[in-house]
Image (cartoon, rainbow, N blue to C red):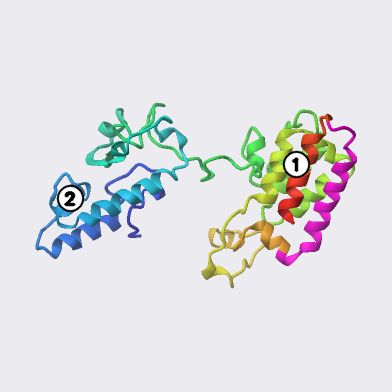
């Protein structure tokens, strides 16, 4: 893979050795001027050797724009500077090629990295928690999704079997019995079909009362509104051959082109709309006073129904 500026694919460590695409670009640019880069290509890319950035000043602009764009998409929030007013000039980037240990201030030292200074930090990817290296969440999300079963349990959950062997399950402030909690969390382990299952769960019996709990509101909102995994246009005509998908290639196909809600409304609108209508009907039954504690739950169901509509 020779993707340029592929920092996010390697844990945001900015490894020099991982930047094969950038190395090729710098080498070929300099070859046009009969300049052999050798092992010094990284210093040329960083601007420590000014030849490249002076000969092609647009390269420095391109490099810095891409870095800022990717930096503010980093899923490890600890790397960001403190919130305050900054002068525009503090955002100018200063690049260096240094040992890992020097960039992060502590061992280990596994090779050369790009160290980028700006916004009052000596290295933008460094944070204050030892060992000071960025560590994006395994989920790949900046904020954990409430629609993931693992977000609500003490141990990771990948399949329904993982729930069956748990000694205790969350009760959501005593709003759900153990059996109901197991059923709800098991629905979350099947992302592609969880929306109708979860809506059916909350429109059965008196479970609408459980939406007094903020955690259960977060689950329902995430299931309905989060778009989920994107199915790239090149793969729209493909489909998994096994259920469940048993390879990484097939798991990539368990996704939607425009988000789960739009897919459900395009393919099976009657199911989703009937559940939303039933949920709204049940919530309105709770209305007995403008000052009642049920008001927040009623407003929540109204928002969900309106966004589905």
User: Residue 5 at what x, y percent from top left?
Assistant: 33, 52
- Residue 179 badge: none
- Viewport quadrant of the N terminus: bottom left
Is 193 on the left or on the right of 29, as rendered?
Answer: right
- Give the number of callouts: 2
Main SS of the magenta part reads helix
Q: Is residue 154 above or below residue 74?
A: above
Question: Is residue 20 rendered magenta in the image?
Answer: no
Q: Which residues are magenta?
A: 266-290
The residue positioned 77% from the left and 54% from the top of the image is 196
User: Residue 104 at what x, y percent from top left?
Assistant: 31, 32
| Quadrant assignment, res 93 | top left
Is 110 on the left or on the right of 218, as rendered?
Answer: left
- Viewport quadrant of the C terminus: bottom right
Question: Is residue 280 rendered magenta in the image?
Answer: yes
The residue positioned 76% from the left and 28% from the top of the image is 173
For the residue pair 25 and 218, the one nearer the viewer reads as 218
Neighbor class of circle 2 (other Cα within 10 Å; few <14, some 14-19, many 20+) is many
- SS type, badge 1: helix
Is 44 on the left or on the right of 260, as rendered?
Answer: left
User: Residue 246 at what x, y percent from top left?
Assistant: 60, 59
Neighbor class of circle 1 (other Cα within 10 Å; few <14, some 14-19, many 20+) is some
The residue positioned 61% from the left and 53% from the top of the image is 228
Q: Are marks 2 and 1 in contact (CB under 8 Å)?
A: no
| Quadrant assignment, res 249 | bottom right
Q: Circle 2 sits on which residue?
A: 44
- SS type, badge 2: helix
User: Residue 275 at what x, y percent from top left?
Assistant: 82, 53
For the residue pair 188 and 127, the one nearer the viewer reads as 127
**In the image, farthest residue toward the left:** 34
**In the image, farthest residue toward the bottom:** 237
Q: Circle 1 sits on which residue?
A: 300
């Amino acid at each position: 893979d020779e993707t340029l500026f592929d920092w996010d694919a390697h844990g945001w460590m900015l490894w020099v050795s991982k930047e094969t695409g950038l190395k090729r670009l710098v080498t070929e640019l300099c070859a046009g001027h009969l300049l052999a880069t050798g092992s010094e290509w990284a210093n040329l890319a960083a601007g420590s050797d000014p030849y490249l950035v002076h000969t092609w000043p647009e390269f420095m602009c391109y490099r810095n724009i891409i870095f800022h764009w990717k930096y503010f998409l980093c899923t490890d929030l600890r790397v960001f500077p403190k919130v305050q007013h900054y002068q525009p000039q503090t955002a100018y980037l200063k690049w260096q090629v240094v040992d890992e240990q020097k960039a992060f201030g502590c061992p280990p030292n596994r090779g050369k990295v790009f160290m980028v200074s700006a916004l009052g930090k000596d290295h933008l990817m460094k944070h204050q928690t030892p060992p000071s290296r960025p560590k994006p969440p395994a989920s790949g999300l900046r904020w954990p999704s409430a629609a993931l079963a693992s977000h609500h349990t003490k141990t990771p959950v990948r399949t329904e079997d993982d729930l069956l062997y748990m000694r205790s399950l969350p009760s959501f402030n005593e709003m759900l019995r153990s059996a109901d909690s197991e059923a709800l969390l098991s629905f979350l382990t099947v992302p592609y079909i969880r929306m109708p299952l979860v809506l059916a769960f909350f429109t059965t019996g008196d479970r609408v009362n459980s939406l007094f709990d903020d955690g259960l509101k977060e689950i329902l909102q995430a299931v309905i509104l989060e778009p989920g995994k994107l199915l790239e246009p090149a793969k729209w005509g493909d489909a998994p051959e096994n259920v469940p998908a048993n390879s990484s290639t097939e798991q990539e196909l368990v996704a939607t082109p425009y988000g789960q809600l739009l897919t459900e409304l395009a393919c099976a609108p009657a199911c989703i709309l009937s559940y939303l209508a039933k949920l709204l009907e049940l919530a309105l039954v709770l209305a007995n006073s403008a000052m009642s504690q049920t008001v927040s739950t009623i407003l929540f169901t109204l928002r969900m129904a309106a966004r589905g509509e």
